[in-house]
Image (cartoon, rainbow, N blue to C red):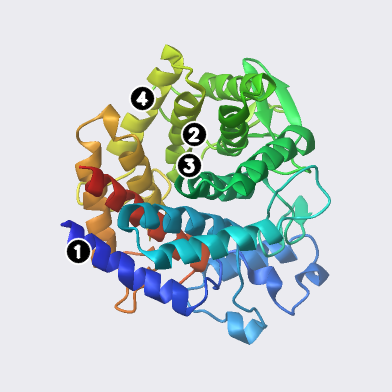
């Protein structure tokens, strides 16, 4: 796929996003309905979320669910628009990046030690319930990734202060679990257990702040989080999703999170300057597993291993991002990222510019989710375009 074809896809997607003013639905936004699912007991909310997530027909308007601005999506858009401005120098991208940065600056979650963000909807499992905008390390990390890119491109000192403030939130408000080999940073202020990608995303914020102000405490905490995740890698290079220290069990879920984990470890090394051979080896083996097992030769991602369907847009986008960002580990990675992008554009982009949620063997779920689909694909394609420009 040549650069013009790639940029044409980006323009169509960009125009769709801007026409909708960055607003949209989310796979997990069912609890924004006027229906009180809590009246059905503890299983009501999580079952409702799964129904909304898996239903290929978008009945959200009938349930009173409105399109919204998702803080995580806004953070992804901020990184994408900052990248596009750096590539093209077009003023329109600077104006949108400034709007996105200002919106995020004005809409953090309130009542915490520093800047932090959460989803714009309630979310629930049988054992817990989180109100909308309950901040998480995951949402905050992707917002800060966008803010960090904005800082690099535009040099805005307010962005630097927000990064340090978010690091304080991670350091003060998120519980830490001490474990053999290191520690794990919690998903939210109310979470237990050890989710590998969530812990490393929290560590990413700490190391970004430390890269700017040389905070040794933050570096040490991030390194301890890295060390624990290294102990959980399997011989074949994969990681499971999380660890429960109470019963010493893991939740097995192999998908785009494999790309998250390898990427966070890589970014830790890049930002801290810590080239520990154990981390290098873990990244190399993790990426090799991801590349060889998560994708078909034509660029379509598998679902959650060993399941092959559906092709999910988040698996597609993360594959592009991970293989572009860490392409130095193999000369196969960058060409394959291009192949993933081409398959995704050919098979999952609507003529109106937006990307489908999932593609099954015999049908597609074409609901145009704003965060899960459009924000991630704009960032993925912008990341690939940036690398193509560099090449």
Left or right: 192 as drawn, with respect to 286: right
For numbered disc 2, what is the local secondary structure? helix
Does residue 312 appear anywhere in the picture? no
Name the residue located 24 percent from the left edge and 60 percent from the top edge.
Answer: 6
8 and 118: which is toward the camera: 8
Could you classify mark 4 by the number of other residues whose Cα lies within 10 Å: few (under 14), some (14-19), or many (20 or more)?
A: many
Badges 1 and 3: C-beta atoms under 8 Å apart?
no
131 and 275: which is toward the camera: 275
User: What residue did someone put label 3 on?
Assistant: 257
188 and 156: which is toward the camera: 156
N-terminal of the pair, mark 1 or mark 2, is 1
Left or right: 374 as drawn, with respect to 338: right
- Looking at the picture, does residue 128 appear above or below residue 42? above
- Where is the N terminus found, in terms of image quarters? bottom left
Q: How far apart, in angstroms, are the residues tagged by discs 1 and 2?
A: 30 Å
Q: How far apart, in angstroms, are the residues tagged by discs 3 and 4?
A: 15 Å
Q: Position of residue 293 (x, y in %)?
A: 31, 38
Name the residue located 52 percent from the left edge and 45 percent from the top edge.
Answer: 155
User: What residue did someone put label 2 on?
Assistant: 264
Q: Position of residue 211 (x, y in %)?
A: 56, 28
N-terminal of the pair, mark 4 or mark 2, is 2
Q: How far apart, in angstroms, are the residues tagged by discs 1 and 4?
A: 33 Å
Badges 1 and 4: C-beta atoms under 8 Å apart?
no
In the rendering, which numbered label is found on residue 312? none
Displayed quadrant of residue 13: bottom left
For numbered disc 1, what is the local secondary structure? helix
């Amino acid at each position: 796929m040549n650069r013009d074809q790639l940029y044409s896809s980006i323009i169509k997607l960009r125009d769709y996003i801007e026409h909708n003013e960055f607003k949209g639905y989310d796979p997990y936004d069912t609890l924004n309905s006027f229906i009180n699912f809590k009246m059905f007991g503890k299983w009501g909310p999580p079952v409702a979320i799964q129904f909304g997530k898996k239903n290929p027909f978008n009945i959200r308007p009938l349930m009173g669910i409105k399109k919204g601005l998702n803080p995580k999506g806004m953070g992804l858009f901020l990184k994408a628009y900052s990248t596009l401005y750096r590539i093209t120098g077009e003023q329109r991208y600077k104006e949108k990046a400034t709007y996105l940065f200002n919106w995020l600056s004005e809409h953090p979650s309130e009542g915490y030690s520093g800047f932090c963000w959460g989803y714009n909807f309630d979310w629930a499992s049988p054992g817990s319930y989180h109100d909308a905008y309950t901040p998480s390390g995951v949402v905050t990390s992707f917002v800060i990734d966008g803010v960090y890119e904005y800082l690099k491109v535009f040099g805005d000192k307010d962005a630097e202060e927000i990064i340090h403030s978010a690091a304080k939130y991670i350091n003060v408000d998120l519980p830490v679990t001490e474990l053999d080999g290191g520690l794990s940073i919690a998903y939210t202020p109310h979470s237990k257990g050890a989710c590998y990608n969530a812990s490393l995303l929290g560590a990413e914020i700490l190391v970004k702040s430390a890269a700017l102000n040389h905070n040794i405490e933050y570096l040490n905490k991030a390194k301890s989080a890295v060390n624990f995740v290294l102990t959980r890698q399997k011989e074949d290079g994969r990681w499971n999703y999380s660890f429960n220290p109470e019963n010493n069990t893991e939740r097995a879920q192999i998908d785009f999170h494999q790309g998250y984990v390898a990427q966070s470890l890589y970014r830790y090394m890049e930002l801290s300057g810590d080239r520990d051979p154990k981390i290098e080896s873990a990244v190399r083996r993790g990426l090799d597993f991801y590349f060889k097992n998560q994708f078909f030769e034509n660029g379509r991602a598998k679902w959650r291993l060993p399941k092959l369907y559906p092709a999910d847009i988040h698996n597609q986008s993360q594959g592009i991002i991970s293989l572009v960002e860490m392409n130095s580990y193999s000369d196969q990675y960058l060409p394959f990222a291009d192949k993933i992008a081409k398959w995704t554009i050919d098979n999952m982009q609507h003529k109106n510019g937006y990307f489908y949620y999932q593609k099954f063997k015999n049908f597609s779920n074409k609901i145009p989710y704003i965060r899960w689909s459009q924000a991630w694909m704009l960032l993925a394609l912008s990341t690939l375009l940036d690398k193509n420009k560099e090449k």
